[in-house]
Amino acid sequence: MTDPLLEVDGLTVDYLTDAADVRAVNQVSFTVDPGEFLAIVGESGCGKSTLLFAVAQLLSPPGEIVAGKVIFRGHDMVRLGRGELQSMRWRDYSIVMQSAMNALNPMKSIGAQFKDTLEAHGNVSKADIGRRSTEVMELVGIDPAHLHSYPHQLSGGMRQRAMIAMALLFTPQLVIMDEPTSALDVVAQQSLMTKIKDLQQNLGFAVIFVTHDMSVVHRYSDRVLVMYAGQIAEAARTEEVFERPLHPYTRGLMSAFPSVRGPRRELIGIPGSPPDLARPPTGCLFHPRCPDVMPACLGREPELYPVGDAEVRCLLYAEQARKAS
Amino acid sequence: MAEERNPRTSSDPAASSGSEPVLRAADLTKHFRLGGMFSKQVLHAVDDLNITIAEREIVALVGESGSGKSTVARLLARIYTPTRGEIYYRGRPLRSLRSRKDLLWYRGEVAIVLQDPFSAFHPVFPISHGVMRNLALHRPELSGPERRREAERVCETVGLGPKMLDRYPYEMSGGERQRIGFAQALAVRPKLILADEPVSMLDVSIRVGVLNMMAGLRDQEGVSLLYITHDLASARYVADRIVVMYAGHMVEEGPTETVLSSPKHPYTQLLLSAAAEPSEKEAEIAADSGEPPRVINPSEGCRFRWRCPYAIEKCEQVTPRPTPIGATQVACHVAVAEAERASNPASVS
Amino acid sequence: MAIPDISVTDSITDVEATRAPRRFLRTVLGNRKAVVGAVILLVMAFVAAFPGLIAPDDPQAAIYAQNAGPSSAHLLGTTQLGQDVFSQLVWSTRLTLIVTLIVTAIATFLSTIIGVTSAYVGGITDRALTVFIDVFLILPVLPLLILLAAYLPPGVTSLVIVLCITSWAFQARQLRSQGLSIRNRDFLVAARARGERGIYIILVEIVPTMTSLIAASFLSLAVYVVGFAASLQFLGLGNSSELMWGTMLYNAQQASALEAGNAWWALSPGAAVAVLGTGFALLNYAFDEIGNPALRPVRRKRRDRSSA
């Protein structure tokens, strides 16, 4: 039984604003094993991006981690000082953002940005810089001649690949990705995902992948965390989530995708909208929209109950879990 | 298990044949000059597009970014004027609309719903502003209280309570705002609504609700819709016919099921294989990493040829024109040749 | 199939009274610069409205001792002609403030209309208007003044005309830039698609979204106008018998007040100009901060970590 690579325990993030304090991430715990592909799924406002930023220690005010630990390679990153964090950044873990145009410097060539990154995080000789830059470009399938190009000269798909190349410069053990394909068209999306999965299997790094696209999740991830209103609603192996979704929200999500190939049926989606976290509903945060709501759901906040290998935050399974324990 | 009839699509596709189509675009072309007034760079956003929309029909215009689909919407809404070609609304060419009165009449017949629910509304006024302005401009015969009642009626038609009208855009969710976008369009009592990627920026669980609402508009209000999207699955869900665009050209067109069950154009096939299915674990992965080109000063020939696994010499020389194959039209030399061979095994092509 | 009514569950926030005007007031009061600036302007406005309450002496009555220094009877001394300087200062507030506000209002109006129209209409009109704006931008003010001074009768009217001509162009460029940036926002495309007239779009759809920029323009222009009006009058464009701070400066200069012993006669109008300008400037900074939260001073709330 290998030790997990990353262990997040009770992570809680608040946004402290003048109007109200909003709990964007509420007691989230999960682990990531070496080489594992973990998908974090949810819709807008569920807190998945905030969670990602918190794990990567990139939160800035008014967002603040108010509780919990993020243990990576034996260190609790929440408590680490800037210097220690800096030495881990990019070498042990790296980040790919949603939009390359926001993350890449439009005034510098790709090669110059790789050079900056390599120099910022390590003592690398000039020859090594050239060699490594060419290597990562080839890894992601871009002609190394583009090291001289500027971001705006590349297409959207190529820019995203360049971002991934940059994230792999030090072959980190963990790569965190925030919806890297959402700005791309369908065909480019698919080829990028294939490439990411390829690289992951060849180089052996773990991936935390945040997305709202369930189909990407199914094809490429090992485990799934479904988030709703800042909490984990369901956590399970990917196969299980798709074959037997437990949480009513997950079931609603699954049935909200029209299919291109299967039989045509009428879909319902999930009525209503995610809650305003400044004024959350009582009891279970999902109850106003839940098709299986019970009277207990209005008053009692469900915990994460184990159901086999999975965990579900739903009172429907409270009895089951109690009996099993 | 017998294939279930999709209750979302119109039950009688034959009903509209024979009557005048609501909208017909003939050889519709739009070019933009890039750079200053003296630049020679011309962007071909749309070239020689022929498209028809019948009554009580939802037509999906499918393509990736750069395909020209948004330009088509703006041409049909008369926000842009065509470089060449003509648009006929119920037989009447749009060129004949000269005066402000004529144009205003047209805008009361064809309404557009835009993609971004977060910037499509005036930030300072309540959400009723657009609806009321539309009523003031296009239904001047209504009195003040009648207008308010009508605004409430269209609100309810799209599934929102009448109190929503007094809210401000920032107080509403994306799904609610998009529905108001449709309400605004409905207020003028259009025959055709042009919906430019209306659900792309919405959460997945909200999309279905809006798509169902669109189908309801066709069934109950008798409105035709042009649904512009890059998502084949949602196109399949609501549309009666599909038109696929690539780099400014129409490449394939026909009834939804026919096009999706047996796509003839290589680009349609590529799109279909790339359209991921939530329930599928594995799928044939198309070996393609290209993206649609920006078409600047193009030469003759098929614009898909660099990515096409079947390209032949003719593809470089002659621009393929849409040709009927069965119930669909396809702009591909190879597909047309194969179809001819299949129907005429004796002839040598 | 009926379209489901989702109005019940679809609302995200309870719409209470946290609407724009009330929030705005709360934000303004919470900002220190805004409060100080507002207080200055309110005091000035009060003084302008009720000068008699503060300085009951007739400012023009030349009945007192001449060139006297400050005393309890004359807080700022007297002029060369024996007029009470403090009275003059107080009574000049009204005309100074009125002129400032009129000029700023006219110039802001001109710059808004010209800038936004230029941005919205585009094409050749835009190019022509931009050239027009540029011409006024580079007008050399002083030579123009000297020219005009020869032809225009000295006084407030001429001052207003000259100031309006020379101060509208700068903000016009800014407002044009802003107009260009929002020109293709979807709600404006929607307005065109509805069939709205151009004038309607400019006045009703575009200008209201630029209120914060227009307010900022107004305030920063006011700072400029206050100072420049005084400068012009100091140089002699004003009518020395009109009661304004600038004319006080002129008169004091002509009478060599600094040497004659009542320095306050020369210094107090300048100080008043500075205070008024500061009031406008503070409000301007405050608006920037209110409009752009990134500029606000960071007040990190200390949270007890164990309370989560």
Image: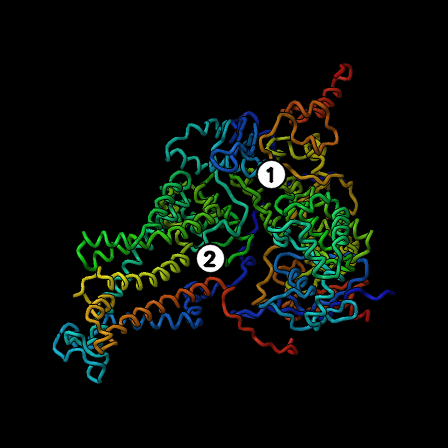
Looking at the image, can residue C221 be seen?
yes
Q: Based on the displayed image, in which of its 4 quarters is residue C123 positioned?
A: top left
- Above or below residue C200? Residue B258 is above
Tell me the residue at 69%/61% (across/down). A120
Dot 2 falls on a residue whose secondary structure is loop
Looking at the picture, tell me which residue is in the foreground, B340 or B147. B340
Disc 1 residue type (three-letter) = Gly
Tell me the residue at 75%/69% (across/down). A71
Q: Based on the displayed image, in which of its 4 quarters is residue B100 positioned?
A: top left
Q: Residues within 10 Å of mark 2 (few under 14, many from 20)?
A: some
Label of residue B66 in the image: 1
Quarter containing the C terminus of chain A: bottom right
Looking at the image, can residue A282 be seen?
no
Residue pointed to by mark 2: B167
Disc 2 residue type (three-letter) = Arg
Quarter containing the N terminus of chain A: bottom right
Tell me the residue at 50%/70% (across/down). C297
First in sequence: mark 2 vs mark 1: 1
CA gap, disc 2 to disc 1?
A: 35 Å
Looking at the picture, tell me which residue is in the foreground, C89 or B9. C89
